[in-house]
Amino acid sequence: MSNIRLIDTHSHIDMIEQISLDEVIANAAANDVEKIILPCAYPKDIDKIIDITEKYVNVYAYLGVHPSEARDWNDSLSEKITNYVSSGKKVVGIGEIGLDYYWDKSFNNIQKEVFIKQIRLANELNLPINIHDREAHKDTFDIIQANNENSTVIMHCFSGSVEFARECIKAGYYIALGGVVTFKNAIKMKEVAADIPIDRLLLETDAPYLTPVPYRGKENQPAYVRFVAEEIAKIRGIELEELAALTTQNAERIFNF
Ligand code: NI
């Protein structure tokens, strides 16, 4: 039996197309992935995501609306999410929320407004926030600092510099790294992986996207979080087992697993 324990803290397993959900879960278990957190992007998917967490004991949910879908937000979603949380569903955070200036900058103001609303919702529910920040580092950081009162902040798929990572660490945030860190040319990400305190590090896949080496280009799945862990352990010069244990403990602390 292996002593490796991993958690994939951000995985869109509902979007994986080439294998069934049963296979996704079995492959994860076979690769020592103990838990998977399934984020929500589209309001229409909230019920489906809750259904998946009911079906699979090791799957938990973030509920929220992705910045690229911010125009689909309506205030009744706060009530819907609150109802799921208060009825004891496996919701461990609000996400993925934030700002995305890469795909479409034409509705930045709506993105900001919806981001702030969801931070406040997380604060009310006393849940962590899982942050999507793409080419919007400064605005994302400033909005969190100005609006977040009590939610633990997790920077999902962190894509900033070492300097920005340090700023986030100083502000008390966690940083989640995924498959990009395994890419040969991802110098900046490898620097971040080496630099941040290990008690602030989380692992993720962002499946079905951003598949790590050696499966880069193929469809991603939670089982591959192991390659992310192996690469970061190598960068930091520690054993895989230790890296896995420490990052898993971080997730257990944040999400009360
Ligand atoms: Ni995502």
Image (tube, rainbow, N blue to C red):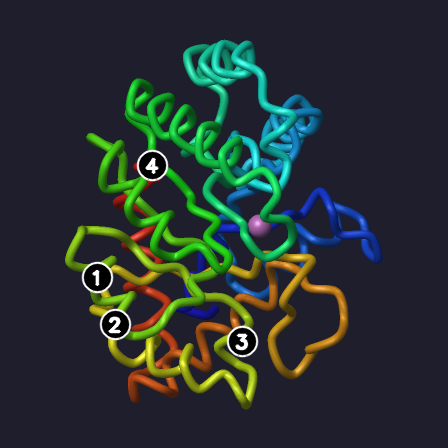
Q: Nearer the viewer, residue 132 or 182?
A: 132
Q: Amino acid at mark 3?
A: Phe
Q: Earlier in the sequence, mark 4 or mark 2?
A: 4
Crowd around label 4: few <14 · some 14–19 · many ≥20 (10 Å): many
Q: Are marks 1 and 2 in contact (CB under 8 Å)?
A: yes
Question: Of tags 3 and 2, which is closer to the observer?
Answer: 2
Q: Earlier in the sequence, mark 1 or mark 3?
A: 1
Q: Which mark is residue 167?
A: 1
- In the rendered image, residue 53, in percent from the top left (x then y), is placed at 59, 31
Q: Are marks 1 and 4 in contact (CB under 8 Å)?
A: no
Q: Quadrant of residue 209?
A: bottom right
Q: Amino acid at mark 4?
A: Pro
Q: Which residue is mark 4?
A: 128
Label 3: state its secondary structure. Answer: helix
Q: Which residue is mark 2?
A: 163
Residue at 40% over, 81% down: 188
Q: Earlier in the sequence, mark 3 or mark 2?
A: 2
- In the rendered image, residue 3, in percent from the top left (x then y), is placed at 39, 68
